[in-house]
């Protein structure tokens, strides 16, 4: 499992990648040199170039879990590729003149157009994995930057609440890590749903179980080997123990 040695095929791929990057870079410079842009203008910023090179609809580059991205994160991950520079007739970010007649249509129409698409505006900006609330946050973020007065649906609203529900989180963590031992009872792990095996452990109470499982116990590795947050781990313990009550 070492990354140190690369197969010749991988090296060729990497070299090809570098060549493509250089060619694209030269093309961009040539385009700028002939397009009359002020070289100091925002278009030259690394971020703007990266945004323009990004394929449309690529998932949002952000650490926020799906469904929890803010309007700004969605905008700078997706919408910026057209709305940043005003490509294809897209109303430019922060351009109050371009946005005023659109904002005047009202929130519902703006959201509908962003959801379903509108002329050269693709549905959800081409990012099908965006939740409706995330899309609405981006619409509010862009509208407000151009004089609108919208309220971004809060992160952690109805959609967020489902994502943060301990029962949902616990089940997810269990399925990703804990089931490796607790489904089969490998290495003497108390089996999922096995009331007899869990009864003496449940006597420790949830906090006691969380404490011992966090530290690790004999063949049970610390946190079961889970690398996520303590709250997520606790949710998994709760999920496991609830199933054995
Ligand atoms: C592929 C380019 C592209 C991307 C990506 C894109 N848009 Fe657009 N958008 C457009 C264009 C073009 C228009 C103008 C359409 C028209 O009025 O004919 C537009 C218009 C809009 C409007 C105004 C609609 C109206 O009723 O006037 C909203 C709101 C909007 N976009 C939101 C978004 C959001 C939110 C994202 C990111 C999730 C996004 N767009 C991503 C191209 C894009
Ligand atoms: C590598 C196998 C393995 C994995 C993976 C694993 N466990 Fe365990 N777990 C065990 C074993 C074995 C025990 C019994 C330890 C003992 O009592 O000797 C145990 C016991 C426990 C206990 C009872 C602790 C106590 O004090 O009685 C809890 C709670 C627990 N695990 C939760 C989890 C959770 C939550 C995960 C996933 C995040 C997880 N485990 C992943 C093997 C594992």
Image (cartoon, helix red, strand yellow):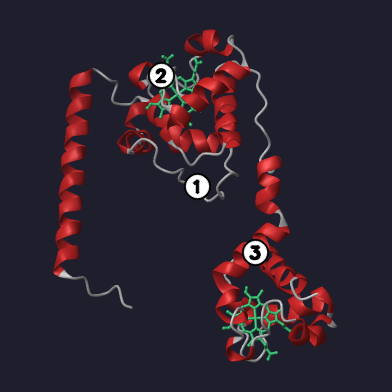
Measured as percent of width and height from the top left, residue 170 is found at 67, 64
**In this picture, residue 63 sits left or right of residue 233:** left
State the quadrant of the N terminus: bottom left
**Residue at the spot x=76%, y=83% of the render?**
198
Image: 66 above or below 6: above
Task: Please report contact status of discs 3 and 2: CB closer than 8 Å, yes or no.
Answer: no
Residue at which label 1 appears: 62
Q: Earlier in the sequence, mark 2 or mark 1?
A: 1
Circle 1: is it few (<14), some (14-19), or many (20+) Cα within 10 Å?
few
**In this picture, residue 216 sits left or right of residue 55:** right
**Element at label 2:** loop
**Element at label 1:** loop
**Element at label 3:** helix
Residue at which label 2 appears: 90
How far is disc 3 from disc 2 in space, using C-alphas? Answer: 42 Å
Q: Earlier in the sequence, mark 3 or mark 1?
A: 1
Foreground residue among 119 and 137: 119
Image: 142 above or below 147: below
Measured as percent of width and height from the top left, residue 94 is found at 50, 20
Residue 110: name its quadrant.
top right
Picture quarter with ligand 2: bottom right
Measured as percent of width and height from the top left, residue 155 is found at 66, 41
């Amino acid at each position: 499992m070492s990354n140190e040695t690369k197969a010749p095929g991988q090296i060729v791929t990497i070299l090809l990648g570098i060549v493509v990057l250089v060619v694209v870079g030269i093309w961009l410079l040539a385009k700028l040199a002939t397009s009359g842009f002020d070289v100091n203008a925002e278009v030259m910023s690394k971020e703007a170039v990266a945004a323009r090179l990004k394929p449309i609809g690529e998932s949002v580059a952000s650490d926020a879990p799906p469904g929890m991205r803010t309007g700004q994160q969605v905008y700078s991950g997706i919408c910026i590729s057209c709305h940043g520079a005003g490509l294809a007739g897209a109303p430019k970010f922060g351009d109050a003149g371009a946005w005023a007649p659109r904002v005047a249509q009202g929130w519902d129409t703006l959201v509908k157009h962003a959801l379903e698409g509108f002329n050269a505006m693709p549905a959800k900006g081409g990012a099908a994995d965006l939740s409706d609330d995330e899309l609405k946050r981006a619409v509010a973020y862009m509208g407000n930057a151009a004089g609108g007065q919208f309220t971004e649906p809060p992160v952690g609203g109805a959609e967020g609440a489902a994502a943060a529900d301990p029962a949902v989180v616990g089940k997810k963590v269990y399925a990703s890590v804990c089931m490796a031992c607790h489904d089969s009872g490998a290495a003497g792990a108390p089996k999922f749903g096995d009331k007899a095996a869990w009864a003496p452990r449940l006597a420790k109470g949830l906090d006691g179980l969380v404490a011992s499982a966090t530290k690790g116990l004999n063949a049970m590795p610390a946190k079961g080997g889970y690398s996520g947050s303590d709250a997520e781990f606790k949710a998994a313990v709760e999920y496991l123990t609830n199933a054995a009550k």
